Image (cartoon, rainbow, N blue to C red):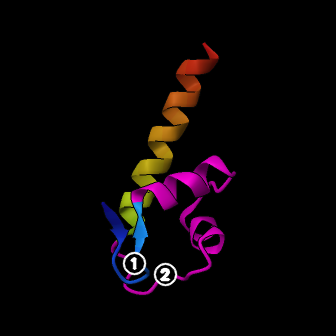
Amino acid sequence: MYVCNCNGLRERDVRAAIAAGADRPAKIFKACDSAAQCARCVCDMRKMLDEEREMLRYAAE
């Protein structure tokens, strides 16, 4: 599934950037060698970041 249509970023690209340490949308774009254009994807990226933080929180318990 595409998360960012402007840059052609797929969900797997975003998740790989998050796994590599990106902790905010700007860092995800940088890790994927792209830049925000229309910014519609930023909300989805934030949601994915929140999901990752939540999974890490449960894993730490």
**Amino acid type for the residue under numbered disc 2:** Ala
Q: Nearer the viewer, residue 42 or 30?
A: 30
Magenta-colored stretch includes residue 1: no
Pointer 2 local density, CA inside 10 Å: few below 14, some 14–19, many at least 20: some
Which residue sits furthest right? 21
Q: Nearer the viewer, residue 41 or 2?
A: 2
Pointer 1 local density, CA inside 10 Å: few below 14, some 14–19, many at least 20: few
Task: Check disc 1 and report the residue beneath it.
Answer: 39
Where does the magenta region start and end? 11-40
Q: Residue 36 carries which label?
A: 2
Q: Nearer the viewer, residue 33 or 55?
A: 33
Q: Are marks 2 and 1 in contact (CB under 8 Å)?
A: yes
**Amino acid type for the residue under numbered disc 1:** Ala
Residue at x-position 58% and y-position 60%: 24
Q: Is mark 2 on a helix, strand or loop?
A: loop
21 shown above or below 52: below
Residue 17 at what x, y percent from top left? 60, 57
Magenta-colored stretch includes residue 14: yes
Residue 16 at what x, y percent from top left? 57, 53
